[in-house]
Amino acid sequence: MYLIGIDVGGTHTDAALLRDSSVVALAKVPTDHGDLFASTRKALEEIWHFYPGDGPCRLQLSTTLSTNAIVEGKGAPTQVVAVPGPGVNLASLDLPFTVHELSGYIDHRGREAYPLDPQELQGLRGLLGRGEGEAVAVVGKFSQRNPAHEQQIGAELSKWYRGLVTLGHRLSGRANFPRRMITAFLNASVARRQLDFVQTWRRVLQDLQIPLQEVLILKADGGTMTLEASVERPIETILSGPAASTMGVQALTSRQEPNYLIVDIGGTTTDLAAVVEGEVLFERDGAVIAGYRTLVPAVLTRSIGLGGDSELHFTPEGGLVIGPRRAGTPLCLGGERLTPTDAVSALELAQVGSRAKAQAALEAKGRELGLSWRALAEQIIEAFVHQLAQAVESLYRELEGMPLYTVREVLNPPDLRPQAVVGLGAPAPVFIPKLAEALQLPHEVLPHSAGANAIGAAAAAATLSLTVHADTELAKLTIPELGQQEDIPRPLFFDLDKARSLAEERLRELAKERGLGESEEIYVVEEESFQMVRGFRTVGKRFMVRVQLRPQVRRVRG
Amino acid sequence: MGKTEPVVGLVFFPAFDWCITPDHPERQERLLYTRDQIQEEGLFDHPRIREFRPRLADPGEILRTHVVLPSLERNITESHRIAAGGTMVAGDLVVDGVVDRSFALLRPPGHHANRIVHGARGFCVINNEAIMVDHLRSRLGPDLRVAIVDTDAHHADGTQDIFYNDPGVLHISLHQDGRTLYPGTGFLSERGGPAAYGQTVNIPLPPGTGDEGMLMALEEVVLPILEEWQPDLVINAAGQDNHFSDPITNMGFSAQGYARLTDLLAPDIVVLEGGYSIESALPYINVGLLLALAGLDYSKVREPGGGRRSQSREITRQVAEICRQAKELWDTRGQVDLKEVFGSGPFFERRRQIFYDTDQIMESQQEYIRLCPSCPGWRVIYTSSTRNRTPAAAVLLPWKPCASCQGEAREQYGELEKDQRFSQVIWQEPKSGAGQAPTNLRGSEPR
């Protein structure tokens, strides 16, 4: 099996061709921000030259289409229809979109406390109009426990609304009404673009006469999904670039430690991610993009403004702070301001640009500060490593601050601390060994580091998850991601094992429907089981099971 | 606190794997729906609400406040240590200025736990607020002035017992009248020991009291007393069983009422106590409480379904009368001749029978407090129970003991140690550490 991975980055679009678990070729073209499609197509054409044609080939794409549309505020005009019920006043949330509030309420058990008002439903017609070229997100409180209200509103809209409609419960089985509103809003606003994108790709692949077996899209959780799924859930494609990089690291690293730290050092920023027990950590609630807090499952990355091209600030006390802003191109590469890269060049820690230029600039600045050029350069390197180590510490502090809700966890908190450092990015060979030394950990700097993101995109596997909420007292179970609510036929005999096997069975069906293989391993991400007692009598049990396909990455040989 | 946009530290510990017994009100499920509601409202995620992990309380931190018989290990589980530790985290967060206010939303509760512990009473074994108050005094020094306002429907007899003779603590308890509810105490006449007379304030409310009555007591008694006493810290022991849907009490409070109370009281630290209407009340009360604590809009918080009866005119009249009496007792506390109440010494003696409903234990206690003109006075307590039949003795020093009390207490302890009649003789002496300056206390800012 051949795999092509393409990652659209800020500066370059990278492509990688793998044959099973070996890298066959890498390619790189400049990203054309005016026409992302053209540069992506160019990258594909470049890498296609290396495809020998002796086996099926699949393309896995990490795009910035939705990310950019959200960051630049270029989504379709989108309104939100919400059923908030009693609780936090929506008006106090400063939501960046128009919300039409309907009365009605689903409570925390998923029971309808108040029904929707048919007159208000009718009234939506006047409020929303026909919606040509527009979109609507429909979100109710606790819709993940009972999607009935969202579905009723959806059914009403389908009679006359022409725009695209997103129902909140389809996107996530997790609690968090404000995040669900935002996620559904963003999803609705970029849905049209994703549809156009998918149609264009289909056309292009026909034109190019490239016999790709399949095209998959990369998601923020480092997994892939089909083109069809991406039309329904485009929001999941956001931030797939950083996710692709961490997938690349997992594919390429030879470290065997279960816990390690990933440090991706770039020109402007450094991204940190953590692997624990062999799996990269996810955001607790979901991705944050352009200040929007979403429920999109995403690789947890923390970005700091520290890179090879960062600004240097000398304090009057003789201290030095690097970043967080970018200074521009380093002097040694023809820029105008001193950067960490110039210190690297002058000290010959790596061959970058004109060493003479770098040294001259350091000498000039050093004279001002009463330092030799060498002492100054060393101070810059030291400050860089120091700030990096601080950022690492604050990442793990944050992770270790995550709440624990059981006695068992408090007594044995999970060990998240890294046992190794894996670095990538152009400045990595210089800084990673020093960082590892400061942290007293072994390290690895990845080969092919320039293409790790594309390799990660190629090596990623499908991810898919769903949630089962079951309440045996009400004899109801809900699978929000599938929009299903059904009766539990024999509630007395329903237990956690049954909830688990039902979840697995439905996920397997969904995987099949989405064209994924049957071999994928399903595992339980989260589960809960509570006995419900009223008076002094057990009246039922409540279960929550969240299952997913085990995120997999092919280990790749360099 | 003057801050209009306070940041709230939330120490949430639902102990999802701990219960007294599987069908007991204190069971795994108790905070489940509260978690669901807070999560769904997005409050764990709110920029002004920060969540913190609890920690395990050390045995020394518990024994600074309690005398536990026959031993700590025989009485508490890890869950009790985490609830006490989590409450101390909530206290530290505020005094260290990490957050402006904090909320220890955790279980098991503690306000029925007395200083002497033979077992569990009213679902409580150790007193979370009291352990926190002593922890803060050990860090910040014994001059810290702490007010505890207990709004649980049950009288906070444990907290009252622990601080009964402690001039550093003002303890106000609003509760359903003790003639109608466990633990059967908390009358206007219980006003504190010789060294802290008047600083135990009880406001027993008639069954059926609703938001109006509770808020009346707050506005006419509690707030003026706090204004006058000027505490450095206000702690709200926030029981949520005054709610009209609570299965084990008879009050008529609503989620809006709780939020309004929190808003008016503006406590620095809130600690959850009871509250067993786990589905119909707790989720909404806790959302309202968190919003009010963080200075956010709580106007739309209400429990669906309704069912609240408004307070009758007769109850309003009764509450007004109780408020008048409670305020009068406070205002005249300085005019009472303490010799008439406690005798002229050298010791004040108190004998009590204490019932432990949860563990079905009866304790007999005899206490002697030294009536000392220059400090709160040392104490000796003799205690035995149906669980620990051989009596134990405890010699207790107050915060800031005078030299003569220290000497006398030492001597008494030495004698008791030689006495074969006692199974154990315990020495308890609260001590302050380095005495760091508090950074963010009420005293430094106008209320």
Image (cartoon, coloured by chain):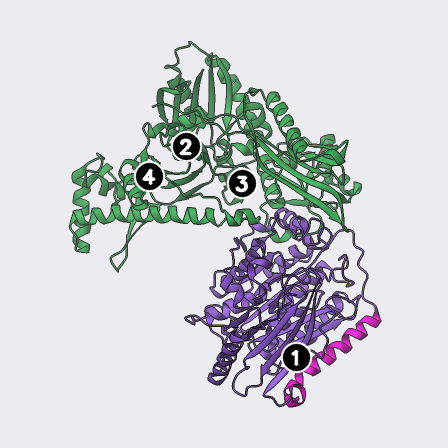
Cβ atoms at labels 3 and 1 below 8 Å apart: no
Toward which corner of the image does residue A448 lie, by quadrant? Answer: top left
The quadrant in which the C terminus of chain A is found is top left
- Of labels 3 and 1, the one closer to you: 1
Above or below, A489 against A178 in this view is above
In the rendered image, residue A166, in percent from the top left (x then y), is placed at 64, 34
Q: Name the residue at 65% across, 61% down.
A: B120
Q: CA distance from mark 3 to mark 2?
A: 18 Å
Q: Which residue is mark 4?
A: A267
Q: Chain of mark 4?
A: A
Q: Which residue is mark 3?
A: A286
Q: Which residue is mark 1?
A: B350
Q: Chain of mark 1?
A: B
What color is chain B drawn in? purple
Amino acid marked by disc 4: Gly
Q: Chain of mark 3?
A: A
Q: Which mark is residue A245?
A: 2
> Magenta part of the protein: which range?
B313-342
Q: Is residue A471 magenta?
A: no
Amino acid marked by disc 1: Arg
Q: CA distance from mark 4 to mark 1?
A: 76 Å
Above or below, B437 against B344 in this view is above
Majority secondary structure in the magenta region: helix
Cβ atoms at labels 2 and 4 below 8 Å apart: no
Q: CA distance from mark 2 to mark 4?
A: 15 Å
